[in-house]
Amino acid sequence: MKNNTMRQTMIDAINDYYDRLESNDSPKTYIPATTENYEFIKELSIPKAGRNLEEMVNVLHDDVFPYRIDGEHPRSLAFVPSPVSDVSKLGDIITTLYNPNAAGWFSAPIVAQIHQELIRWFCGRVGYGESSGGVFVSGGSLANLTCIIAARNDKLPIDEIHKGVAYVSEQAHHSVNKALRMIGIPDTRIRKVETDENMRMIPESLDALVQEDKKSGLIPFVAIATSGTTNAGTIDPLEDLSRICKKHNLWFHVDGAFGASILASDTNKRLLKGIEEADSVIWDAHKWLYQTYTCAVALVKNQQTLLNSFSDNPSYLKDAASGQVQSWDLGPELSRSALGVKLWLTMQVLGTDTFAKNIDYSVGMAKKMESIVLNTKNWEIVTHASLGMLTFAYRDSRFSDEQMDKFHSSICNSITNDGIATVLTTEIHGRKVVRICTISPDVTVEDLELTMSELNKRMQSLIA
Ligand SMILES: *Cc1c(COP(=O)(O)O)cnc(C)c1O
């Protein structure tokens, strides 16, 4: 499988990628695929006889990967496509070349050491002590599942699963509901805790719901807060929620998939005060720590809770086990890529100060965007800049709510499909609004002004 032609093809592929990037003066944020693009791939089908390597590599360059939302474009302002460090890409490529199995210490000991160092760093930023731990997983969804399994095993006796109740806010990410269903908690026992006008979970409402469920003989076992929410970057009141959870012996989980990265910043980490009280936290590195897909961690205050849930000690792994805590004992997966190595390389090369600086910059740019919106006639802020995210909308009383919703969808589709900026809508208090996420470290004030003026131009032509 290895020969010099292959080596050259690999090197050429990297060169071709950068050549294409550099020769493109005005890269689009998005290139939608056409019918011909789909047909071309269908016609290639899955062949019985092999095709020429170079030709097929060119197919990837020309016919597959151009059609995507470019998350690295500074005007990729829709949540979630993430900006990526080239150092992470390089780490990913090298990791793929060696292709270690990061299942445990035996198969790749120094990779395991690196993963342990990183887990200590993540736990340290959360404010966890020595008994904490965690595991690398592919993304926030699997990380939520991992923590919610630990919650169930810790707080809900297995023969009483049919009585278990979970508490989320209506702003929780859908992966949380999915995870709860997967562990056997149906929608009828997932309570949506009321939120305030800023869409933060109301601790007193959680308290009241838990008391009610206890009275009816049910077993409340987990409450899930989000910091920040996918919709608006909102941060649930972590300190107060953790107090209610302690009072009722609930597992307190914080979904920080996107927002936990603020903990990398000494200036801004106070925004998540109280997160150190959580029993578990998830954190995606492929969102706001500039990593390629996929890279996330599930963290727990007490590592033993993961071991209780996932450790099994099968006979065929006994030789490999060697008394150390193995990744395969801390989560649902066995074989896996060394997800943390690219992050480790990025941290080694850039230093965590660079991460902090970039994150603080993004927080500031969302505030800048807020003032740009306010300076544009008839536009108003719906949710204020929080964790690099904000939502806003056009107000014109001549049109019905339904019409205004359509206009908002239409301007976002149009600016995205034209490849000028990737901007999507979301729904806040039942109304469609524009959502902007300024987490690219390369986004400039000019980018934001251009985006606002293009959105406004499109809106004006619709209402004219
Ligand atoms: C993105 C996100 C998730 C899901 O993470 P994936 O890595 O896409 O699986 C979960 N929760 C929140 C709050 C998110 O923003």
Image: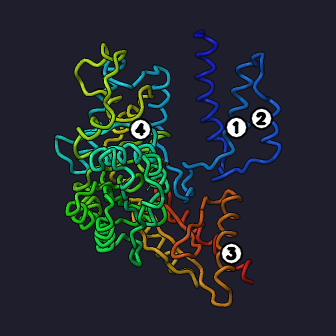
Instruction: State if disc 3 and disc 1 touch (CB < 8 Å).
Output: no
Instruction: State if disc 4 and disc 3 touch (CB < 8 Å).
Output: no
SS category of the residue bearing label 4? strand
- To which residue does mark 4 refer? 137
Name which quarter of the figure residue 427 lies in.
bottom right
Instruction: State if disc 2 and disc 1 touch (CB < 8 Å).
Output: yes
- To which residue does mark 2 refer? 41
Per the model, the C-alpha gap separating discs 1 and 3 is 32 Å
Count neighbours of disc 3 (C-alpha within 10 A) and say few if under 14, some if 14 to 19, many if 20 or more: many
For marks 3 and 4, the one nearer the N-term is 4
Residue 407's tag is 3
Amino acid carrying mark 2 in the image? Ile
Amino acid carrying mark 1 in the image? Val
Per the model, the C-alpha gap separating discs 2 and 3 is 35 Å
The image shows residue 76 at horizontal and vertical percentages of 56, 56
- To which residue does mark 1 refer? 64
